[in-house]
Amino acid sequence: MNVVFMGSPDYAVKILDNLNKHFDVLAVYTQPDKPVGRKKILTPTPVKKYALKRNIPVFTPTKLNAHDLKIFKPDFIVVAAYGIILKKDVLEIAPCINLHASLLPKYRGASPIQSAVLNGDKYTGVTSMLMDKGLDTGNILAWDYTEVKNKSSIDLFDELADIAANQIIYTVKNFNNIKPLPQIDALSSYSPKIKKEDGFVDFSSALIIDRKYRAYQPWPGIFCEKFKINEMKLIDINSENEKGKIIKIDNEGIVVGCERGEIKLFKIQVSGKKEVKAVDYINGKRLKVGDNILR
């Protein structure tokens, strides 16, 4: 079976690796190298790094050219978090299977894993979808699920990548025997591209802060007007408090009140400075129980 693979982040690497073990991966398409860090060093995607190590031909176009793809004569085109929309002439080359990290039609779009965490979903999963010209609107070929629990996006990315890596092998091998299931558009929802400002928290709700903390790892993280919250845990979701009031201090961290609920801060970071323990931060500010950390 001949496959062309399209993907970019770590989530896609596990899928590509398993495809490479079972089928002939003729070529890999991924996002162009991007500047990373303060020095803006051009860095390849994780998928490109994988392909280069294994001598798989890799391409990084900003626009897909159907003529170039036809040369490979693939039996399937497999897509996982590629980041470029496939147009009709590409979709007609071979069956295009997208491994979307949600239980479609829920969370079509760019951030399905984060959306599942943010909304407090009990379950999320991976859907193999036969791509069409819409945004994650194609017929469903297969799906598998897992519990969200208190997992972060990092945890779920890793877990769902394992699920997707196994699911694609099943889907390709059984493709001719699978009856595609149309999505119900009336049940669909959309997960938008995440922006840095989405990480802002205002201490209104401990539950929302916890969900944002778990959803926005590793980026953009969460922050308030005073500092970035690098490590924390949820303590309570029902108590009523003054925003930012220090409720308890121990050697590990500090419990801070929200209008609804409480969180415990372990590590924080003021803009332009190094990460510090929350206890060291309030000691430096000479704050005690009853004081407000946000003032």
Image (cartoon, rainbow, N blue to C red):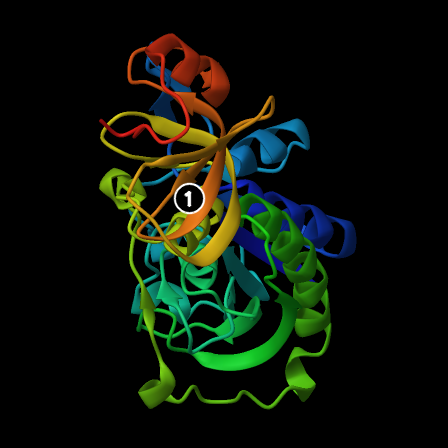
Q: Quadrant of residue 138?
A: bottom left
Q: Is residue 245 left or right of residue 152?
A: left
State whether residue 129 is above or below residue 295. below
Q: At x 67% / y 70%, what residue is drawn?
A: 172
State whether residue 77 is above or below residue 104. above
Please, what secondary structure does the residue beneath circle 1 have? loop
Q: Foreground: 120 or 83?
A: 120
Q: Is residue 62 left or right of residue 42?
A: left
State whether residue 71 is above or below residue 126. above
Quadrant holding the C terminus: top left
Q: Is residue 58 left or right of residue 291?
A: right
Q: Position of residue 252 (x, y in %)?
A: 60, 25
Q: Residue furthest front?
A: 290
The residue at which mark 1 appears reads as: 216
Q: Quadrant of residue 107?
A: bottom left
| Image label count | 1
State whether residue 288 is above or below residue 151. above
Q: Label 1: few (<14), some or many (≥20) within 10 Å?
A: many
Quadrant holding the N terminus: bottom right
Q: Give the residue type that dot 1 points to.
A: Tyr
Q: At x 52% / y 81%, what residue is drawn?
A: 140
Q: Position of residue 129 (x, y in %)?
A: 50, 73
Q: Is residue 27 visible?
A: no
Q: Is residue 50 visible?
A: yes
Q: Foreground: 150 or 185?
A: 150
Q: Position of residue 294 (x, y in %)?
A: 26, 30
Q: Foreground: 165 or 113?
A: 113
Q: Position of residue 128 (x, y in %)?
A: 56, 71
